[in-house]
Amino acid sequence: MSEQAATPPAKKKGGMKKILLIAAGALVLVGGGVAAGIYASGAGLAGSHGPAVDPNAPRLVRIDGHEEEPGHGPKAGEQPDPKVYKASYYVMEQPFTSNMRDSDGFAQISLGVSTFYDSRVLDRVKDNEVAIRSAILMTLADQDAFVIGTPEGKRALQNKLRDTINETLTRATGYGGVNDVYFTNFIIQ
């Protein structure tokens, strides 16, 4: 028995080795996660860059002639301030003549449009004038002669025509940009 008491118990081998392996594995996992996060944010997958800006999108033109950087200016749905931004105009040469809804009457109007954006909007209006004319004639044919004979009816028609033009442009080019519609001639018979 004295021999057993004199011999110290055997130590477990590899305890430190296990701890080092676990620590190294944890470092590899954490490092891999960090690397994946950096890659994802650099590739735009994490959304850190904000919305992508289309270089073909029209830009607002300030009164001083400089173009506004995308993302600046009024929020979506807000009209640009005419004290800050410069309006450009385009008058459609041919008048629009259409029968009125539920009547024997007709309307003949001439239109001009304006935009606070660069020349791309008016160029797109000119390039898509046939589709725009058709959409305007369809909108006119759906109007009541008594309603558009009033000042309120004319203002409502201006808004409808502006929306019609922007919808047509958006379908054709991806962008609207017409801010106002003006009557240069208006006859109802």
Image: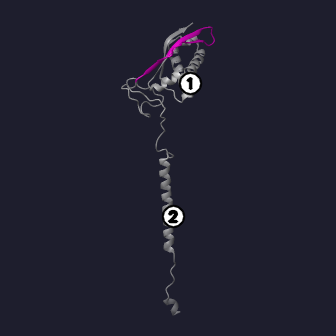
What range is drawn magenta here? 86-111
Q: Which residue lies furthest to the top in this view?
A: 189
Say if 25 sits above or below 175 in the image.
below
The secondary element bearing badge 1 is classed as: helix
Instruction: Give the amino acid type for the residue marked by disc 2 in the picture.
Output: Gly
Q: Residue 38 carries which label?
A: none
- Image height of 70 relative to 20, above or below: above
Is 87 included in the stretch rendered in magenta? yes
Pointer 1 and pointer 2: residues touching (CB < 8 Å)? no
Q: Is residue 75 above or below residue 110?
A: below
Q: Name the residue under label 1.
A: 168
Picture quarter with the C terminus: top right
Residue identified by numbered label 2: 25
**Residue 107: horizontal and vertical position, in percent?**
56, 10
Q: Nearer the viewer, residue 75 or 49?
A: 49
User: Crowding at label 1, few (<14), some or many (≥20) Cα neighbours within 10 Å?
Assistant: many
Point out residue 10 in the picture as x, y percentages from the top left corner. 51, 83
Local secondary structure at mark 2: helix
Where residue 15 appears, x then y in whole percent? Answer: 50, 74
- Mark closer to the chain start, 1 or 2: 2
Q: Residue furthest bottom?
A: 2
Q: How many labels does the image show?
A: 2
Residue type for callout 1: Thr
Eye-nearest disc, 1 or 2 = 1
Quarter of image, res 67 = top left
Q: Residue at x 49, y 65 (%)?
A: 24
Q: Which residue is drawn at 54% across and 20% down?
A: 129
x and y percentages locating residue 146 in the rendered image: 56, 10
